[in-house]
Image: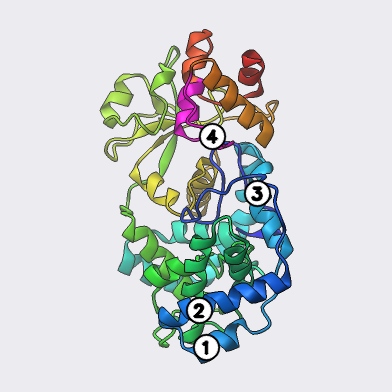
Amino acid sequence: MAPGLGLALGLSAGMVQSQTILPDPVAGVEGEMGTQAGLDAWIQDFRPRALAAGIPAATFDAALRGVEFNAKVVERDRNQNEFSKTIWDYLDTAVSEDRVTLGLQALDRHRALLDRIEAQYGVEKEVLAAVWGLESAYGTYRGDLPVLGSLATLAYEGRRASFFEAELLAALKIVQGGHVDRFAGSWAGASGHTQFMPSSWEKFAVDFDGDGKRNLWGDEPADALASTANYLRHWGWTKGQPWGVEVKLSDGFDYDQTTERVVKPVADWQAMGVRTILGADLPDHGPGSILLPGGHRGAAFLIWPNFQVIEKYNTADAYVVAIGSLSDRLRGGPPIQSTWPRDLRALTLDERRELQDRLTRAGFDAGGVDGRMGPKTVAAVKAFQKARGLVPDGYPSLEVLTLLR
Ligand code: CA
């Protein structure tokens, strides 16, 4: 994510992490903090495994010589879920007028390149620009933490050791192949214009400018944007299908139907009285779902499978809506029309856990007490709301928590 534009990690509904391939962190775990000496010992322990995986000894030694233990990265990893934002606060920053303006300029500047990528991979240039805009403010903020240091620290520090060790191995392959000059990124090892994890580089990066390197880090964004297109295509992007459209629900709409788990033909939604936010008939792009990412007092969207493709970058609803809305704006479309319930605040991590705990005790299976507002928690909130005669929108509000107390 782009630190310079304040896209903090951790949203109330679905935690924002840079790319979905990051496993769920165990939030707020206390424990021994590692040391530089501990990291140095770990690197010696890791060395034979890396060499066995095909990293030449000279590459390994040169790359990891002098790597520094980074306590801040560990801290960040342990605490990332404690900070919460509502979707409207997130969108204010993610789809700010500044980001739209800069995006239009970036599209102008790179139009020929983006046209070629769109033609080859079948992913619209505005979508690629939106990912670029959110991940690095169009290449402006690519992160300045040494990737090898972050990954080595997180691999050594232990809680998700095997995941980060595999990422470190992939990062060493990047170094080995001479693909990167300045290997810097954000705290968990995502790096480059569109913040790829090294394992994603391994699987999806392409050499679009044909210089023999799959370089996501240099000033030229060609490889990074094409790699992002390749990533989205791999996960099933359908050109011409919107991510979603903002809709208006009919009075008395059955809120049980508002979840990604309910998929219906557009004609069915139309028959249930759903219209675009401007009151027009729904465009038919195949079966879709109705999503209320800010509860029933916020915007509603009819979403299509491309929504789930963007989720492969980041599972948070807010992130996907931001990419979608920003891409709409870059195409000349309107901003989200509905207002949001700005009087509501995001629940803290402790409150989210308490909500799950109390739901479970009250007989509504929240799927664990991890602070993540995943599908099971949302379903449990809906069931509780129904039982209490509230609008069952599944939104984990303070009102719901208060009623459970
Ligand atoms: Ca290249």
| Vertical side of 340 occupied by 328: above or below | below
For label 3, count other residues whose C-alpha is less than 10 Å away and answer few (under 14), some (14-19) or many (20+).
Answer: many
Labelled disc at residue 80 = 3
- Distance of mark 3 from mark 4, alpha carbons? 15 Å
- Distance of mark 4 from mark 2, alpha carbons? 35 Å
Residue 185, quarter of the rendered image: bottom right
Residue 233, quarter of the rendered image: bottom left
Res. 224 visible in picture: yes
Q: Amino acid at mark 4?
A: Met
Q: Is residue 351 magenta?
A: no
Mark 4 or mark 2, earlier in chain: 2
- Distance of mark 4 from mark 1, alpha carbons? 42 Å
x, y percentage for residue 332? 50, 50
Q: Verify CB contact (< 8 Å) between mark 3 and mark 4.
A: no
For label 1, count other residues whose C-alpha is less than 10 Å away and answer few (under 14), some (14-19) or many (20+).
Answer: some
Magenta segment? 364-381
Mark 3 or mark 4, earlier in chain: 3
Some atom of ligand 1 lies within 8 Å of the CB belonging to the residue at label 2: no
